[in-house]
Amino acid sequence: MEEQENKAGQSAGSSRRALLHEILFESGTPRGRWTDIVLFILIVASVVAVMLESIDTVRYRHQDLLIGLEWMFTIAFTVEYVLRLYSARYPGKYARSFFGVIDLIAVIPTYLSLLLPGAQALIVIRILRLMRVFRVLKLVQYSRAGIHLLFLLQESWKRVWVFVLALALLVTTIGAVVYLIEGPENGFTDIPLSMYWAVVTLTTVGYGDISPQTPLGKFFAALVMIIGYAIIVMSISIAGRHIKRTIPCVRCKETKLEKGAAYCKHCGHKFHQH
C-alpha cells in the first residue's frame, strides 16, 4: 500500500513538473504563450520602475511605492526562477545558461539591499531584466538570421581584421596630421587626443568638445567627414555583396537548405532551439 502511495506521489510530482515545464519553457502552447505575455509585462514594468527610481524628484515623492513595486517584482521573478529550476529537465544546465544567470542576477540587488547599505542603488544590474525579453519573445523568425550573421563573421573575419587595422592606421594618420595643423594652442594638445577627434569625426558623431579653428584645419575636417561617409557606404556595399539568399548551417556550412527548415538536411543540426 505504501509503495503504491509512493508511486502515486512520484507520478503526481512528475505531472506537476511537466505542467510547469509547459507553462514556463514551451511558448508554443497556449499556456506558454500566456505566461510569456505576463512575464513580458512584468519585465517591462520592472524596468520602467527602475528608470523612474533614477529620477530624484520621482524617487523622493514616491519612494515607498517604488520600494513596494521593486519587492513585488523581485518576489515574482524569484518564484519564477525557482519554478524554472524545479521544472527544467536539466536544472544545472539552465542555472549555468546565459538567461539562467541573467534571471539570478536580476533579483540579487534587492536581497543585497537588506544586508549591504547602498546595494539598492545597483540600478544597472536590475536593468538586465530587460534582456530577458528576448527569451520571452522567442524571436524564432530571427534565429536563422542570427545563424547567417554568425556564418558571415566566420567567413569574413580575416577581411574584418584587415579593415580594422586599416581603419586604425587611418585614424592615427588623421590624428597626427590634425595635430600638426592645429597644435596645442587650438585644443589639440597631443596626438592621442587628436586621434579621439579623428574617430569622432570619421564616425560623423561630432561631439563638438574639440574642433579645428584654422581654415586649413576646417578644410581637413571636412575631408575627414566625407571619408567617414565613404567608409560607411563602402562597408554596407561590401557586406551586401557577401550576403547569400540561402542561410547556411552553422555546423556543416551547408547552404542548400529548404526555406523555413527546422533541421539541416545534411547533418541534422537543429536551427530553432528553445
Image: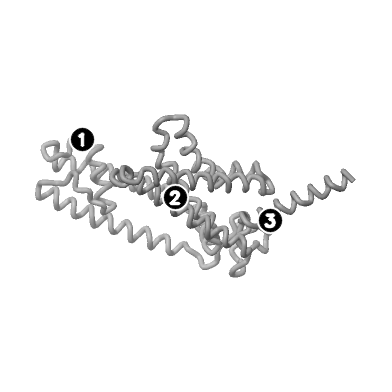
Q: Secondary structure under badge 3?
A: helix
Residue 190: mark: 1
Residue 47 vertical position relative to residue 179 in the rendered view, above or below: below
Total marks placed: 3
Question: Which mark's residue is nearer the viewer, 2 or 1?
Answer: 2
Q: Are marks 2 and 3 in contact (CB under 8 Å)?
A: no
- Does residue 148 show up? no
Residue 265 vertical position relative to residue 221 in the rendered view, above or below: below
Pointer 2: residues within 10 angstroms few (<14), some, or many (20+)?
many
Q: Residue at x 51, y 68 (%)?
A: 245
Which of 96 and 236 lies nearest the eye of the viewer? 96
Amino acid on which disc 2 is placed: Ser
Which of 88 and 208 lies nearest the eye of the viewer? 88
Distance from label 2 to label 3 (Cα)?
Answer: 26 Å
Residue on which the image places disc 2: 46
Q: Position of residue 214 (x, y in %)?
A: 10, 47
Distance from label 1 to label 3 (Cα)?
Answer: 65 Å
Q: Residue at x 28, y 45 (%)?
A: 57
Residue on which the image places disc 3: 19
Q: Residue at x 41, y 30 (%)?
A: 117
Amino acid on which disc 3 is placed: Leu
Q: Earlier in the sequence, mark 1 or mark 3?
A: 3
Q: Position of residue 5 (x, y in %)?
A: 84, 47
Where, quadrant-wise, is the C terminus in this rendering?
Answer: bottom right
Q: Earlier in the sequence, mark 2 or mark 1?
A: 2
Amino acid on which disc 1 is placed: Asp
Residue at the right extreme of this rendering = 1
* Image quadrant in which you'd find residue 120: top left
Residue 228 vertical position relative to residue 259 in the rendered view, above or below: above
Q: Secondary structure under badge 2?
A: helix
